[in-house]
Amino acid sequence: MKILLFGNPSTLHSNLATGLAEQGHEVRCISNRTAWHRFPAYDICLERRTDINGKLALIDYLRHLLPIFRRCKGYDIVQLSNPMFLELRGTHLRPFYNFIRRHNRHIILGSFGDDPHIVEQMLHSDALRYSDQRIGATIRHDSAATLQREQWIEDSRHEVGICRHVAKDCDHIVACLYEYWACYRNVYPEKLSFIPLPIIMENTPTEFSVGDKVKLFIGIQKDRTIVKGTDIMLRAAQDIVRDFPHLAELRIVENVPYDEYKQIMEGSDAILDQLYSYTPSMNSLLAMSKGIIDIGGGEPESYKIINEHELRPIINVLPSYESVYAQLKNLIHHRERIPELKRRSVEYVQRHHDHRKVARQYESLYNSLLHDDKA
C-alpha cells in the first residue's frame, strides 16, 4: 500500500509512519517542524520561512512546495493531519487539496487538533461536560478561548470554508482523542473512526520506585498556557511545593525543542498536562511510557472508547485549581501508590498506544476503504 501523510503534530504521523513501514507499506510523511518544538519531519521537511514576510514569503514557500507536490500522485491513501494541512491561507490551499483529491485514491482527514467543527461543537453542543470553550454551561471568555473562536468560527480569510469543504469531501475522518471523536460524531458520524495515538516505546522501565520527594514535571508552551490550562496546573503545583516542600519538588520547562523536552522529563514521577482534556495527549503518553504518572485527562469516556475496563493509571482532574491541588496533595501524601501507578502507566501505553498496534488499526481502516473500491 502507498501512503502519504501530511503534517506531524506532536510526532503522531512520524510514529505512525514508522509502524506502517514496519508492516511493509510504502510511506512518505511531509511536514514542517512546528516552530520551536522541532518535531522530526520524517521524510520531507517543508517549512515556511519566518525571516521574510508577505508575498515574498508566499513565493518562496511555493517555490519549494510545487516540485514536491507534483510527486504527490498515485497514492492509495493520503492522510491530512488537519484541514489546513499546508502553511497557506484557504484561497491558496484549495487548489492543492483539489490536486491530491484528483490524483490519489482516498483522502482521510485526521481530527488531531482544532478546526471549525471542533470549536463549534465545543461551544454550542452538549458533546462534552467541559472543553477549551465551555465549563458546563459557562462559556469561557479568556483570551485563548476567544482567539479559538475568532480563528475557527469567525474568520473571514476563507480558512473556515476550506476546512468545512475538506471535512465534507474527504472519504473518512479519524479522531485521536475522545473529545474530537465526540465533536465529529455530531457532524459526520457515518464516516468517523477513533484510533488511539501512536507511541514508540523506548527504554521501557521494568522497576518502579519513588524517592524522598515526589518529582513533579510540567512543560509550558508560552503561547498556549491558557488554552491548555497550564497556568492553573502550574499554580497548583507551585503551591503544593510551597506548602509541602519536604514532600514534593517541581521541574518546569518552557519552549524547549522536543528532544530536549524528552531528556528533561526523565526521572520525573508525575507530569501535569492538558487540564481541559478527557484523554491523555502525546506528551502525556510519552511520559507514561517512561513510567511517569499522568495528572490530567483521564475521564471514564476515554477508557470506554478503547475498551479498557481494568487499568486506571491516569490521575484525572477536573478543570479547576482546587481539583488539581487536591489530587496532587493526595498523591504526595500516599506515596505508596506511586510505584503501582507507574507500572500501570507503562502497561496502559503498551496495551493501547504501541505504534505497531496503532498502525495495524490504521491499516485495517485503509484496507476497508480500498476494499469498498472493488465491491
Image: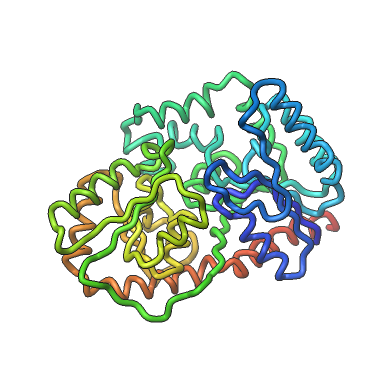
- Foreground residue among 356 and 166: 356
Q: Is residue 357 left or right of residue 249?
A: right
- Foreground residue among 144 and 32: 32
Q: Residue furthest bottom?
A: 207
> Could you tell me if residue 284 is visible in this image?
yes
Residue 53, horizontal then vertical, whole percent: 64, 23
Q: Which quadrant: the C terminus?
A: bottom right
Q: Is residue 106 left or right of residue 282?
A: right
Residue 13, horizontal then vertical, whole percent: 63, 54
Q: Up-down: is 341 above or below 68?
A: below
In the rendered image, which quarter is residue 40 located in? bottom right
Q: Residue furthest top?
A: 156
Q: Residue at x 32, y 62 (%)?
A: 270
Residue 14, horizontal then vertical, whole percent: 64, 57
Q: Residue at x 71, y 52 (%)?
A: 29
Q: Which quadrant: the N terminus?
A: bottom right
Q: Up-down: is 144 above or below 43?
A: above
Q: Residue at x 51, y 46 (%)?
A: 180
Q: Residue at x 62, y 69 (%)?
A: 356
> Could you tell me if residue 190 is visible in this image?
no
